[in-house]
Image: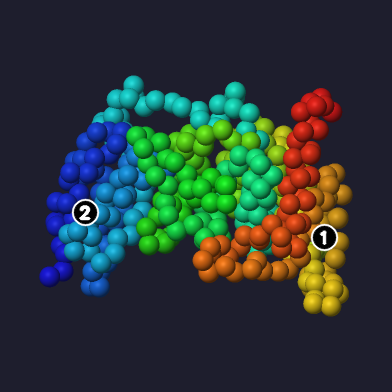
Amino acid sequence: MLLQEQDIIEVLKPIQDPDVKKSIVEIGGVREINIKDDGSVSLKIALAQTGTGGQMKVQQDIVAVVKEAGAESVGLRFEQLSQEEMDQHIDPGQQKEDAGLLDENNDVNFIAVASGKGGVGKSTVSVNLAVALAREGKNVGIIDADIYGFSVPDMMGIETRPTVKGDKIYPVERYGVKVISMGFFVEDNAPVIWRGPMLGKMLTNFFKEVEWGDLDYLILDLPPGTGDVALDVHSMLPESDEIIVTTPHATAAFVAARAGAMAIKSNHRVLGVIENMAYYESQSGEKEYVFGQGGGERLSEELKTELLGQVPLGQPTIDDDDFAPSVYEREHPIGKIYENIASRVIEQKEQRIKSPFE
């Protein structure tokens, strides 16, 4: 017998909003219920706070009870309660403010990885830079801030989700890197349709609600371009380094210059440029410049920064027992390039500590 809407509402009644301490049904938090003939159920739920450990617990509880009621699969989307609903249901004194990584006394090094356009391998660079820094003995985290095109968990072969203890989210750790992604907060790969302000709040909670521990570096894999999320990151972080990823093609480098200019205008320091897909090296050792030459060099000159590395086209060795389709092992020729880039990043940071006014 097909599930009915009332059946869903009944099983959701015991689930409480973790901040309001009332049933999500009672506060009007169940926005939409869609039941398909194949037994799949999709829900839109409103909570007082999203992107928190509380939300993750709620989504796990919802999936469990709705599947137990007979659903074949459960898709979830979240939004925030309106200010009017918040005023009606929650005491402002209940909301505690914890700056987390945004605390001015936190000495983590933020490195935002940006590009002017999609398709240049920015996320691949982010993941491999993070892993290379961890291999150098650094404590590293990565935020998959590409909210609409989250891919870091898949690239790193992550199949588990963060755990929740109390009101804190504990990130997944892989290759020595702590990982948080929007992909952990959707069910069944549901599309993300949140608007700018909502996305900014989600990112803020990634900084505040996640138990990162002591980090040396936090890598932020930004969405391509200079849209809302990139603007939010620039405004949230008064001090951050930025790495711009481009391909050798002149157009890609031209577009990437906008991302670099945005970083400079917001007083972020452009750490350097990485030219991805720089060439293809054949088995005979000859280099073929598939996408042209010179884009990375021109971009670094325009931004008055250095070319940190040129990464060729390639593919990591696939290990079915330890599957991570985008992570290069240390011994791989491209893995060694990322190791050199990580060493240069660390060297730059140490030079700045010794000479902070230069």
Q: Which residue is mark 1?
A: 295
189 horizontally vs 103: left or right: left
Residue at image point 79% right, 39% down: 347
* Number of marks present in the image shown: 2
Q: Are marks 1 and 2 in contact (CB under 8 Å)?
A: no
216 horizontally vs 160: left or right: right
Q: Of residues 116 and 351, which is closer to you in this image?
A: 351
Residue at image point 26% right, 45% down: 29
Q: Which colour style is shown?
A: rainbow
Q: Position of residue 32 (x, y in %)?
A: 27, 55
149 horizontally vs 131: left or right: left
37 horizontally vs 232: left or right: left
Specify the label residue 65 is tagged with.
2
Question: Could you classify mark 2 by the number of other residues whose Cα lies within 10 Å: few (under 14), some (14-19), or many (20 or more)?
Answer: some
Asked whether residue 18 appears in the rendered view, the answer is: yes
Whichever of callouts 1 and 2 sits on the residue coming sooner in the sequence is: 2
- Quadrant containing the N terminus in the rendered view: bottom left
Q: Position of residue 339 (x, y in %)?
A: 73, 52
Q: Position of residue 4 (x, y in %)?
A: 15, 62
Q: Nearer the viewer, mark 1 or mark 2?
A: 2
Q: Secondary structure at mark 1?
A: helix
Mark 1–mark 2 distance (CA, rounded to whole Å): 53 Å
Residue type at numbered disc 1: Gly
- Quadrant containing the C terminus in the rendered view: top right
Q: Position of residue 209 (x, y in %)?
A: 45, 36
Residue at image point 40% right, 60% down: 190
Question: Could you classify mark 1 by the number of other residues whose Cα lies within 10 Å: few (under 14), some (14-19), or many (20 or more)?
Answer: many
Q: Of residues 101 and 321, which is closer to you in this image?
A: 321
Q: Secondary structure at mark 2?
A: helix
Residue type at numbered disc 2: Val
